[in-house]
Image: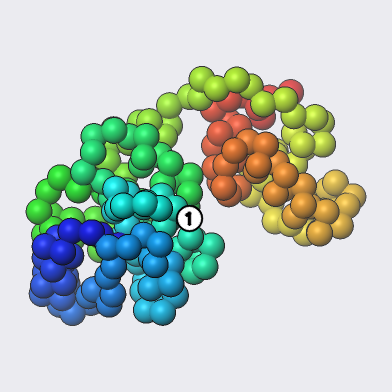
């Protein structure tokens, strides 16, 4: 998803040649509003999204793709040195970020790594992700802390339901509410944010 035709054309030519046909561009658009529909139609393994496409923009495109085709790996790109849009894209569901400051062929090794299941982030962005939060602490009650500890321990919904003596449906509802409260999009982010903010302590 990129509104620069030359960049897209470079990937179309280089991907098949440098990956022995393993990777190819199956669809492209410069319209962020149609990105999710394109992904649903083409069924790619990976969607590469430029964060600076015209409105509604790349971040909304990332979120829309994650909602409609959650199995597709979404990788955000930006030519800006500002980490804020990249962090927003990760919160929206992107599983990786690549700076758009190099030639297309230099992007191929990390793209192949992402296809193999790795998450790829530049060092500066990784430090920003891991930096302890300076946000105001979130006030959690005892039940929410128990739920958060269970999530951080990697327990599944069934196990959490047994521990909290509630139904699986209630656990799912409680988890959704907790994610909203922590302003994160998934369980892994919840555990990481809570750990950085010291929310797992007694």
Residue at 52% x, 68% y is: 68
Front one among 6 and 83 = 6
- Whether residue 116 is visible to the viewer of this picture, yes or no, is no
Q: 54 left or right of 195? A: left
Q: Is residue 186 left or right of 16 when viewed as pictured?
A: right
83 above or below 201? below
The image quadrant of residue 110 is bottom left
Tell which residue pokes out farthest to the right in this image. 165
Q: Residues within 10 Å of mark 1 (few under 14, many from 20)?
A: some
Quadrant occupied by the N terminus: bottom left
| Residue at x 18%, y 58% (from the top left corner) | 4
Q: Residue 130 at x, y = what percent?
A: 43, 32
**Residue 129, percent across and down?**
41, 34
Q: Closer to the camera, 30 or 91? A: 30
Residue 186 in view, yes or no: yes
Quadrant including the C terminus: top right
Q: How many marks?
A: 1
Residue 45 found in image quarter:
bottom left
Q: Is residue 154 above or below residue 140?
A: below
Residue appearing at x 77%, y 36% in the figure? 144
Q: Position of residue 185 (x, y in %)?
A: 57, 47
Location of mark 1 (residue)? 63
Check disc 1 and report its element: helix, strand or loop.
helix
Q: Nearer the viewer, residue 112 or 48?
A: 48
Q: Residue 120 location in percent, x, y?
A: 32, 49
């Amino acid at each position: 998803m990129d509104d620069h035709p030359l960049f897209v054309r470079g990937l179309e030519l280089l991907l098949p040649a440098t990956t022995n046909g393993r990777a190819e561009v199956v669809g492209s658009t410069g319209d962020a509003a149609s990105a999710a529909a394109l992904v649903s139609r083409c069924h790619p393994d990976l969607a590469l999204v430029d964060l600076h496409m015209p409105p509604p923009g790349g971040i909304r495109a990332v979120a829309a793709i994650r909602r409609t085709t959650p199995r597709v790996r979404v990788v955000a790109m930006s030519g800006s040195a500002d980490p804020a849009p990249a962090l927003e894209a990760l919160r929206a569901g992107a599983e990786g970020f690549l700076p758009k400051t190099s030639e297309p062929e230099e992007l191929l090794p990390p793209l192949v790594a992402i296809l193999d299941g790795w998450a790829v982030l530049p060092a500066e962005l990784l430090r920003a992700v891991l930096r302890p939060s300076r946000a105001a602490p979130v006030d959690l009650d005892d039940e929410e802390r128990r739920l958060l500890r269970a999530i951080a321990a990697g327990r599944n919904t069934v196990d959490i339901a047994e521990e909290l003596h509630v139904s699986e449906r209630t656990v799912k509802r409680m988890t959704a509410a907790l994610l909203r409260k922590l302003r994160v999009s998934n369980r892994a982010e919840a555990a990481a944010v809570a750990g950085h903010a010291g929310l797992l302590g007694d």
